[in-house]
Amino acid sequence: MPLARIRHLSLAALLLAWPMAPAFGYEINEQFSVDAELFAYWSQTETDQNGGFKTGRTHLGAEASQEAWRLRILLELDPNNNGGADDGKVRLREGYAQMTMAGNQALRFGVQPNAMVAVDEARLWGLRQVAPTFVEFWGLTPAADSGLSLLGANNAGEGGLLDYEFSISNGEGYDQPVNGEGNAFSARIGLHDGPWEIGGFVYTETDNQDPALAKDPERYLYYAAYDGPALRFSGQYLTGDDGDNGSTFNDVTGHNIQGTLKLESLTLFARQDRIRPIDGGTKQSLVIYGLAMDLSPNVRLTGHYQLRDFGPNDEASVAITTRVTL
């Protein structure tokens, strides 16, 4: 949700709606609604691998609310298109109950979005049909996980707003079986002042004894964002480590810069990620720029160019994506 819209919400309304329900959907009555999101795309790469026409992940959701309670379920169908065992796999992307309490706070239990991924999707990047958010794209944290969260929003003086989320989860992500051999803690705090937001995010895992997963990730991220009537841009800086047993991220550092410019039904967008997974090792990067067109309130067409630098080699691609929502 754009920050401009957040400023016009009461604290109670913001809390009831967070993580934000989709801006699309069909309301059956005041207590129940359903929503759907479908993707299809054409792409062409330098190596002619993974190109051509494909269908993307399909999301089917439902939401019910009654007084202080809110229930949300979201199923994800992954066509994969690779002819493998995961083709057509159905996952529970979200499935949680949320209870609003006094003092502009709420408790949420179940499979729920990662706090930073949710904010990046709703308020910073907002173009998942083009690419996942910064921390999800690079595999730095799960996109969603099963656990318990405390959410809150409070006035911060001079019209400002402070919102926060603290979570304890199993650390395996929404598509992995619970092995009970680890746990994760995450926290995100954001301070809003007019069109500006600054915030921080922490994610740690501990006590993971599974030999196949024997690492204890730590992630520390700081972000700043501006959301005006037409222009939106943000930046993120990340540091972290996988602990003594980690091999993927060792003293990792990275940054992300992204922005959009809305011109009536057209939106220009650009993004750059740069990350060094291992201290002193090879840098990797992602560059995206393109154009989105809203053909109707429920249909968005995007065309973009992407350059993915793996360090020793890189790959350029172009893609046209269609997003249809109910």
Image: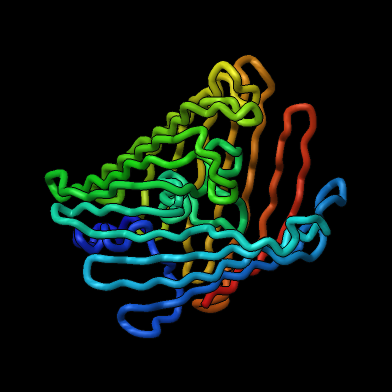
Please say if 37 is above or below 12.
Answer: below
Q: Tell me the quarter of the picture where residue 221 sits.
A: top left
Identify the coloring. rainbow
Residue shown at 65%/34% (left/top)?
285
Q: Tell me the quarter of the picture where residue 79 sits.
A: bottom right
Please say if 95 is above or below 163.
Answer: below
Residue at the extreme front of the image, as rendered: 180
Please say if 62 is above or below 230.
Answer: below
**Left or right: 20 in relation to 10:** right
Q: In x, y percent, where is residue 273?
A: 58, 37
Q: In x, y percent, where is residue 67?
A: 22, 71
Judging depth in this view, the residue of 34 and 117 nearest the camera is 34
Residue at the extreme bottom of the image, as rendered: 28
Residue shown at 45%/60% (left/top)?
95
Residue shown at 49%/51% (left/top)?
125
Q: How many marks?
A: 0
**Left or right: 28 in relation to 126:** left
Residue shown at 45%/47% (left/top)?
114
Asked whether residue 55 is in view, the answer is: yes
Judging depth in this view, the residue of 271 and 178 nearest the camera is 178
Q: In x, y percent, where is residue 208?
A: 53, 29
Please say if 265 is above or below 211.
Answer: below
Asked whether residue 233 is in view, the answer is: no
Q: Quadrant of the N terminus?
A: bottom left
Q: In x, y percent, where is residue 190?
A: 30, 42
